[in-house]
Image (cartoon, rainbow, N blue to C red):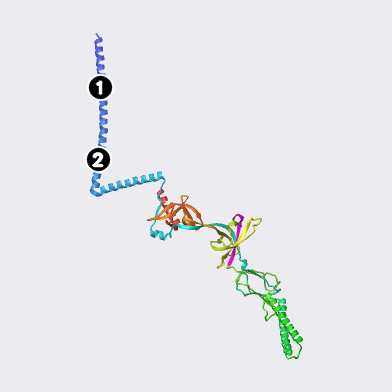
């Protein structure tokens, strides 16, 4: 009898358990659905707010700017288009390695920069060699003044470095030898005068048949001998360079033989000098010699009469001259010969002892196209000439040939008649450098 209630009790428990599970599942399902709806609602609310804000801003801008807003949008699109085009050009330039070599300059800028325009044309190119040398005295115009007569120095009126004139008195010497020579001349003049009077008397007596002809001839011979003695005494004085007359018989004046500069002085007041003492050296520095050291290999290119250009090594100066001498011998130790050129020195700037470089023209040839050497500039390690074009210049690489320092031959790159920047080309090069730097940035 007790088994039935237990069975009913178990069934009731199972039913309650099933209902509880179903309720729990229903509650969980509702919670999940509620969460999804909430998230979806928030997203829709944000989108609606964004649309409303955009619409409001558009209306606000439309009200303030009207048509200007459209122009602003168009400007932004145009700027973006230019930006993309520049970026594309930049990528193109980077990919090809090319750059614009045109330099834009107005006529006013060209004039202010001192740029000179010239035309490429045929020219004669001189091939030359440069040899070392030294300025020397022109020995043809240098004199060593000697007293020729010994004596004591009474006065010295010239100093070292003085510019002297021909015939100017440099010093005075008291010479006993000179006194004797002048005394001999005076005595000879006295004997000649006496002999002349005797001759005239004997001649008159002979003509009047009073004296014999022999006395007349003897008187004539004595007069001739007296005249010879006078001439001999005068010539001795002339040989010493002194005059026959003078208040003081022993006074000897040393005079300058020509215009020049006193370069040496070896005389002082009161000293005794001998006849062979070199007391003064005078040189005419209006012309000097450029003595050239010529290696044996260059002897065939050096000839008398060739034109040369002498350049100083110590300062900026040059002069023209002509080869006047080429030595016939080669030194055993140096294996070089000596040559010299005479150069004018009117302002006395070429001082003896100055080292120089001597440029000698070896030969001369023609060039179909030539430009001035200063027009050539180095651009990217290539010789370049800036040719004139409308609105400025263009950098043109060239191939060069012979050059003489002033003109240079153009083998390739430009033709005769091309206008180019001759002077001031470095200004154009700097402008090209600025343009390249801006392009790189």
Position of 207 with respect to 367 (left or right) is right
- As displayed, is residue 398 above or below residue 11? below
* Residue 283 x/y as whole percent: 61, 68
Q: Residues within 10 Å of mark 2 (few under 14, many from 20)?
A: few
Residue at mark 1: 22
| Rendering quarter of residue 222 | bottom right
- As displayed, is residue 116 above or below residue 243? above
Q: Which structural element holds mark 1?
A: helix
Residue at position x 38%, y 59% in the image: 107
Q: Is residue 441 visible?
A: no
- As displayed, is residue 361 above or below residue 223? above
| Rendering quarter of residue 91 | top left
Q: Is residue 20 magenta?
A: no
* Residue 238 x/y as whole percent: 68, 76
Q: Residues within 10 Å of mark 1 (few under 14, many from 20)?
A: few
For the record, the magenta segment spans 287-297
Q: What's the CA distance linking mark 1 and mark 2?
A: 44 Å
Residue at position x 27%, y 35% in the image: 43
| 82, 224: nearer the viewer | 224
Residue at mark 2: 51
């Amino acid at each position: 009898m007790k088994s039935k209630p237990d069975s009913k009790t178990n069934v009731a428990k199972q039913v309650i358990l099933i209902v509880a599970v179903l309720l729990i599942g229903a509650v969980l399902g509702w919670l999940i659905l509620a969460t999804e709806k909430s998230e979806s609602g928030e997203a829709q609310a944000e989108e609606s707010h964004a649309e409303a804000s955009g619409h409001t801003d558009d209306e606000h801008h439309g009200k303030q700017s009207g048509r200007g807003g459209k122009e602003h949008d168009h400007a932004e699109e145009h700027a973006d288009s230019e930006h993309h085009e520049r970026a594309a050009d930049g990528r193109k330039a980077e990919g090809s390695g090319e750059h614009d070599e045109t330099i834009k300059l107005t006529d006013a800028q060209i004039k202010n920069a001192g740029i000179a325009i010239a035309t490429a044309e045929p020219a004669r190119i001189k091939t030359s060699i440069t040899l070392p040398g030294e300025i020397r005295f022109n020995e043809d115009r240098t004199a060593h003044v000697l007293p020729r007569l010994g004596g004591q120095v009474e006065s010295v009126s010239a100093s070292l470095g003085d510019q002297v004139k021909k015939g100017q008195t440099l010093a005075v010497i008291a010479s006993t030898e000179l006194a004797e020579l002048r005394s001999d001349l005076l005595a000879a003049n006295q004997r000649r005068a006496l002999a002349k009077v005797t001759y005239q008397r004997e001649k008159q007596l002979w003509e009047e048949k009073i004296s014999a002809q022999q006395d007349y001839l003897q008187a004539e011979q004595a007069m001739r001998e007296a005249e010879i003695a006078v001439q001999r005494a005068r010539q001795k004085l002339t040989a010493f360079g002194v005059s026959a007359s003078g208040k003081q018989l022993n006074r000897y004046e040393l005079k300058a033989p020509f215009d020049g500069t006193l370069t040496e002085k070896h005389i002082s007041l009161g000293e005794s000098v001998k006849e062979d003492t070199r007391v003064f050296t005078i040189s005419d520095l209006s012309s000097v010699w450029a003595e050239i050291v010529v290696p044996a290999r260059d002897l065939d290119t050096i000839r008398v009469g060739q034109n040369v250009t002498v350049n100083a090594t110590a300062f900026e100066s040059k002069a023209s001259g002509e080869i006047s001498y080429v030595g016939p011998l080669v030194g055993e130790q140096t294996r070089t010969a000596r040559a010299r050129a005479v150069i004018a020195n009117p302002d006395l700037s070429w001082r003896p002892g100055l080292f120089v470089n001597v440029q000698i023209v070896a030969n001369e040839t023609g060039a179909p196209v030539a430009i001035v050497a200063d027009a050539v500039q180095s651009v990217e390690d290539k010789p370049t000439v800036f040719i004139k074009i409308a609105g400025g210049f263009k950098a043109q690489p060239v191939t060069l040939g012979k050059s003489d320092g002033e003109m240079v031959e153009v083998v390739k790159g430009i033709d005769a008649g091309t206008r180019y920047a001759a002077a001031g080309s470095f200004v154009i090069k700097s402008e090209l450098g600025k343009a390249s730097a801006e392009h790189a940035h």
